[in-house]
């Protein structure tokens, strides 16, 4: 009986001393957190998508408070919350939020089953990462979309899906938050964040093939062949050609669409532009109505 009592007293004493030590240590080494971090964190959407460049919303909140203490929060942006959330954060921190052009993810590959013939059969784990590591995939293009859906799995906002007919990912621009998760998930970097543009209109090269013209065209009928025709018609220095591939700088592009009309392979596309009917088409419609 005495043995049990001694054991209980000993263990109780050890527990009490340990609790006192932990309390003293916690007070001695406690890190005081700025209460504004918690307030900003409540305003942020809590997606923890990493689109802001930080691991999560808590990291973004800390950076915003630190930026406010340094006099500026320029360069910090929550793509999911957008201007509305950043406006609330700026008001909370008594700062001015910089205006940021909204972005959207675009798929820079038009290698549909029709445009890009199948030359091999892949029998393995059907993820883009696994297919990319094993070789060129099932087509002759070693740069284009693999159709494994890694981007779909990475998206937290149900904004991207694989079209079963083309086997290419398609982005729902109304749901896309430009968090960049799909960009990071694609092993071939065919997905890019680009400015939404006025009236959601965009022009870009829908190809990432860096092979020389004849080789690229053999692999895909709509591949960029770096013919320079788009470069010659652009009056705004918005187009560059590097590694056998044209690229349009959306900061310089004025959406004149001359490059689209000049491209012989159709690798340059324009999105959300109004459809204009030719005079002959209008006449045909009128005759059909009469």
Image (spheres, helix red, strand yellow):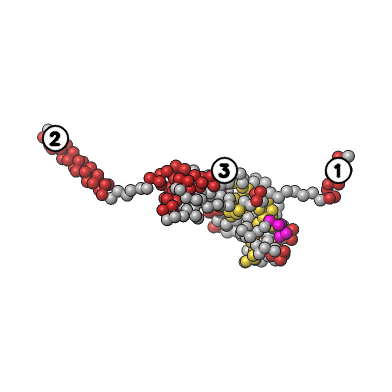
Of residue 170 and residue 85, the one placed in the foreground of this image is 85
Q: Earlier in the sequence, mark 3 or mark 1?
A: 3
> With 110 as the anchor, is 78 left or right in this view?
left
- Disc on res. 286: 1
- Circle 1 packing at 10 Å, graded few (<14), some (14-19), many (20+), is few
Q: CA distance from mark 3 to mark 2?
A: 63 Å
Horizontal and vertical percent position of residue 163: 64, 46
Cβ–Cβ under 8 Å for marks 3 and 1: no
- Which SS type dominates the magenta stretch? loop
Q: Which residues lie in the magenta part?
A: 255-259
- Disc on res. 158: 3
Q: Classify the position of the C terminus by image quarter.
A: top right
Q: CA distance from mark 3 to mark 1?
A: 42 Å
Of residue 86 and residue 253, the one placed in the foreground of this image is 86
> With 36 as the anchor, is 269 left or right in this view?
right
Q: Which residue is mark 2?
A: 5
Q: Residue furthest left?
A: 2
Q: Secondary structure at mark 3?
A: loop
Q: Classify the position of the N terminus by image quarter.
A: top left
Instruction: Give me the residue at 50% from left, 51% from top.
Output: 96
Horizontal and vertical percent position of residue 220: 68, 58
Q: Earlier in the sequence, mark 3 or mark 2?
A: 2
């Amino acid at each position: 009986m005495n043995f049990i009592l001694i054991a209980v007293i000993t263990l109780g004493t050890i527990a009490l001393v340990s609790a006192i030590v932990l309390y003293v240590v916690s007070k001695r080494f406690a890190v005081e957190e700025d209460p504004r971090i918690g307030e900003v964190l409540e305003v942020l959407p809590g997606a923890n998508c990493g689109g802001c460049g930080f691991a999560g919303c808590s990291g973004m909140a800390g950076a915003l408070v630190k930026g406010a203490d340094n006099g500026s929060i320029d360069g910090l942006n929550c793509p999911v919350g957008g201007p509305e959330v950043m406006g609330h954060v700026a008001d909370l921190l008594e700062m001015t939020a910089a205006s940021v052009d909204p972005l959207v993810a675009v798929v820079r590959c038009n290698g549909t089953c029709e445009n890009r013939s199948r030359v091999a059969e892949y029998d393995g784990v059907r993820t883009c990462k696994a297919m990319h590591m094993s070789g060129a995939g099932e087509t002759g293009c070693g740069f284009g979309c693999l159709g494994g859906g890694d981007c779909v799995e990475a998206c937290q906002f149900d904004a991207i899906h694989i079209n079963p007919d083309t086997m290419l990912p398609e982005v729902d621009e109304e749901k896309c938050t430009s968090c960049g998760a799909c960009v990071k998930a694609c092993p071939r970097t065919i997905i890019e964040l680009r400015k939404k543009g006025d009236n959601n209109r965009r022009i870009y090269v829908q190809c990432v093939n860096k092979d020389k013209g004849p080789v690229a065209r053999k692999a895909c009928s709509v591949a960029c062949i770096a013919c320079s025709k788009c470069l010659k018609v652009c009056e705004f220095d918005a187009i560059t050609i590097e590694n056998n591939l044209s690229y349009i700088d959306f900061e310089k592009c004025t959406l004149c669409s001359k490059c689209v009309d000049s491209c012989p392979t159709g690798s340059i596309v324009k999105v959300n532009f109004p459809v204009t009917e030719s005079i002959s088409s209008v006449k045909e419609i009128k005759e059909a109505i009469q």
